[in-house]
Image (cartoon, rainbow, N blue to C red):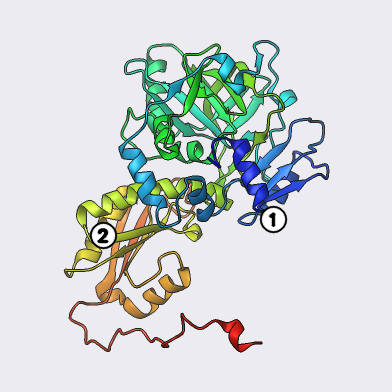
Amino acid sequence: MRAKTLRTWLEYLQSTDRLAVIEKQVHLEYEIAAVAKKLDGRKAAYFTRVEDYRVPVVSGICSTREQFAEALETDQFGLIPKFTDAVNSPLPCRQVQNGEAPVKENIVLKEIDLMRMFPIPVHHEKDSGNYITAGLFIVRDPVTRKQNVSIHRLQVSGKNRLGALLLPRHTFHLYKQAEEAGRPLECAIVIGVDPATLLASQASTPFGVDELEIAGALRNEPLEVVRCETVDIDVPAFAEIVLEGRILPHVREPEGPFGEFPKYYGPKSDKEVVEITAVTHRNNPIFYTIVPAAYEHLLLGGIPREASLFQTVRQTVPSVKAVHMSSGGTCRYHAIVSISKRNEGEAKNAILAALANSFDIKHVVVVDEDVDIYDMEEVEWAIATRFQAERDLVVIHGAQGSKLDPSTNEGVGSKLGFDCTVPLNSEPMRYLRIRIPQYDEIKLEDYLK
């Protein structure tokens, strides 16, 4: 398996000339993020010499849809079906002992100093400090024993202290239950895993589904996990680094601002606090960081959302062919939906279903299946030639949206739907696309010898 671990995936990228090994010494503050951003969408960046550290840093390990597909051993068209199947058929993990888990090669229980141990970067000009951006945040439901996996931005606020932005989802729900009982919530932060496990962490699932089991289904084999040293959490055995800790009850400290996926800053406010109780890591660990708003960040959130969106739209419009959360819409705000229209009005139903799928979705474009939804020039052409606002526009005001969208009023704003499908009763020639016979078969090199 080319993506069994972070290390095997990096070896694969290097063998296919998609890993830039940077031997020039770099600074934590801005330089790592700047170089990785320059390579965004082309190559992963592997920094061997970070000033004052012996630990290397890597970023951009999956910055195209094709790379995520390769990691899942499928192609671009099989990516969403495979992810959907894994969400619907999770595979239980396989427990291993410490001796079988490389992440236990080093165990630190005392004198924890995160900034001394690991090269945690500063990414943007106005960021409030050093941030862990690619840590899988794992907590356990004490009643069901099921774990929940997610990713949260984590600001280093002390030697063994992190400020965490916990959005009102599953982790936050478990934390509030613990806080109301006056106890901390145990957690583990996992840094440096394979792309399948990384992608699984972002699955949109009902409460009580363990995303590590989805990772196993994506890999077609159980994910090997090992129990933490100081908390009752199971973590991927081949991870590079694990930070064990607990979210403190009734404690809030300033966190932010921080550059987020919409390419604006999330504001400063008082947030939950994680106290680190232990650190385990592999020999010669690799620190993995995600540059916010880079393709890797956007796709990591967008691909699982596409799987959820497809399922939602299919319940209303069974003839849906594909969906795409575009990078220009930050893989959150813009949805393009392809349908095989059989009845008038289906496109508008698809719009309403898409908007209901996630409060993040702001604009929906529905097109016929002859339009390539991954080619934004094609999508724009459909808007230009198949859309009339008088009959094809859906407008909803006062809807819940993303609070990170600065154009909203504290997250409340307007949403639009564009029905860009061809009317079923149109004259045959009216919307017939022009075509040059033999175009696809001709090889240009035969004519330029």
Q: Position of residue 163 (x, y in %)?
A: 57, 27
Q: Mark 1 packing: few (<14 Cα in 10 Å), some, or many (20+)?
A: few
Which x, y percent locates residue 80? 38, 51
- Amino acid type assigned to the residue bearing label 1 in the image: Lys
> Is 407 positioned to the left or the right of 244 in the image?
left
Residue 187 sits above or below residue 41 on the image:
above
Residue beneath label 1, please? 38
Residue 90 in picture, x, y percent from top left: 35, 33
Task: Pinpoint residue 25: horizontal percent, then vertical percent.
Answer: 83, 42
Secondary structure, mark 2, is helix
The residue sitting at 45% across, 56% down in the picture is 76
Q: Which residue is mark 2?
A: 350
Answer with the quarter of the image where residue 129 lies: top right
Q: Amino acid at mark 2?
A: Ala
- Residue at 41% from the left image edge and 27% from the top image edge: 148
Q: Is residue 267 left or right of residue 115?
A: left
